[in-house]
Image: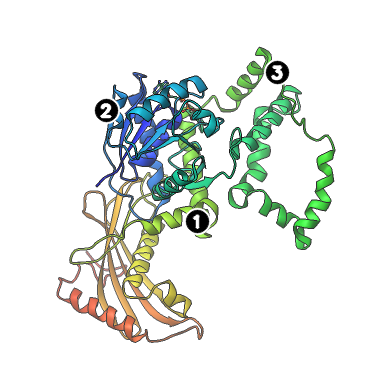
Amino acid sequence: MTQKATIVGGGVIGGGWVARFLLNGWNVSVFDPDPEAERKIGEVLANARRALPALYDKALPAEGRLTFHDDMGDALTGAVWVQESVPERLALKHSIHAQISELAPAEAIIGSSTSGFKPSELNEKGARVVVAHPFNPVYLLPLVELVGHPGICARASDILRSVGMYPLTVRKEIDAHIADRFLEAVWREALWLVKDGVATTEEIDEAIRMGFGIRWAQMGLFETYRIAGGEAGMKHFMAQFGPALEWPWTKLMDVPELTDDLVDLIAGQSDAQSGHMSIRELERLRDDNLIGMMRALKKTNSGAGGVLNAHEAALPDPQGGELPVTVDRSIPQSWTDYNGHMNEAHYVEVSAQATDRFMEMIGADAAYVAAGNSYFTVENFVQYMSELHAGDRLTVTTQVLRGDGKKMHLFHRLHGQDGEVAATVETLLLHMDLNARKTSLPTDEVAANLTAHAENHAQLPQPEGAGRYIGQRG
Ligand code: NAD
């Protein structure tokens, strides 16, 4: 049965939670007294629908159902997960959690998005909340800091992983958990640098994004510094740079007073830096950049890319009819070109994904390749028939034209959103012995599986266009 999440407070963060659950197949109900909440969440959802599926090489589950409620009790009926994301004021959180505790199902997990409050503060009036602190955009970034009752955090972790997130259970409750402690120190230094006229908001952002910001996304702080220590490693690094901490490089705990002048200075510089784009445009730019970086991390199974790979492996494989469905995915923005449709190179990329999946289906999987066997593509012939666009669902069926000896001859049909064939890729592969770097026969098991498919597919009509080559007439 479809599970249900209730989002109490649907602003920047609540809207992101709505998208995270909904696009992972959960039903979602929202309670937020703001008459604009539905419109704002709609805009966040539009961005999320464009972005989240682009991280995956498999289709996400069908979207759940989204409902809005004027009554908190109605919204909470049947909820498995309740996420509170109301403004960061303790008295408001207390009054909301008193209502949630009373109205939510007894077994529901109740999470708070609070950036700063500890669970003991949230629960001091008798509520049963754990902190589940996410990062904006909640629909793309995996991290959720979990703080509170160990048993509830363990159950919460399983649910968060199932919607593609990375729960980090914090060992001890402290104000602002782990990440915001860290970010506050950075923010404080940035305010001083602007106030002292050392740097503008734009120069500070360049100092981050041109250098250490890129580093942090893939190896964090300690692993990066370990490398910086060279062959002598972490001890050497600490000996070299540790003493520098005693020099007054930073302003330590002093906080600049947020006078009207300082606020105006920062807001003015920020307008000059980014005022030419709307917030929604900036969000889309941010999302496209995050997707590109996270897809790169997927290839090396690092950081957020490792989380994506684990989630993708848990998604169901596509099911076929007469022909196996070897790809079922959405088309990422990054695959489209200046014409607004999928660039020709990615037709071959999709066909390679289809071939990889088909190889898995006949037993030529990762273990088979690790054992020194594989198929290598020696020829591809692509027919481009109609346009494919970012966000379109793309499915591929694979027909075996020939599968014996060293040869595997496949015909992939790429179906667009409407189910029509938008392209075909005919591909010939030869079996290889990866150690000898020579062609070879597949194992008996793989050969038998391939032959079985070939015999079944031989009963079907031969695809129109098979055997074509460039230069034919008509
Ligand atoms: P926001 O102001 O964008 O959204 C708050 C929402 O709560 C609004 O839509 C408001 O209408 C609604 N609300 C107000 N009173 C309510 C009530 N009584 N019942 C139900 N809804 C009510 O704020 P936000 O940035 O989304 O922050 C929400 C929480 O998330 C805070 O605890 C914050 O610390 C935390 N958080 C924020 C960020 C961030 O980057 N903005 C990141 C992580 C966590």
* Label 3 CA crowd tier, 10 Å (few <14, some 14–19, many 20+): few
- Circle 2 is placed at which residue position? 74
What is the number of callouts on the image? 3
Kind of residue at disc 3 = Glu
Between 131 and 403, the one lying in front of the other is: 131
Kind of residue at disc 2 = Asp
How far across and how far down the image is residue 320, in percent?
22, 63
Secondary structure at badge 2 equals helix
Contact, mark 3 vs mark 2 (Cβ under 8 Å): no
* Residue drawn at 35 percent across, 84 percent down: 406
* Quarter of the image where the C terminus is located: bottom left
Task: State how far apart marks 3 and 2 are (Cα).
Answer: 45 Å
Residue 391: mark in rendering: none
Q: Which quadrant holds residue 445?
A: bottom left
Q: Is residue 467 visible?
A: yes
Secondary structure at badge 3 equals loop
- Circle 3 is placed at which residue position? 257
How far across and how far down the image is residue 45, in percent?
36, 35
> Which mark is nearer the camera, 2 or 1?
2
Q: Earlier in the sequence, mark 2 or mark 1?
A: 2
Task: State how far apart marks 2 and 1 are (Cα).
Answer: 38 Å
Q: Is residue 337 visible?
A: no
Contact, mark 1 vs mark 3 (Cβ under 8 Å): no
- Circle 1 is placed at which residue position? 306
Q: Is mark 2 within 8 Å of ligand 1?
A: no
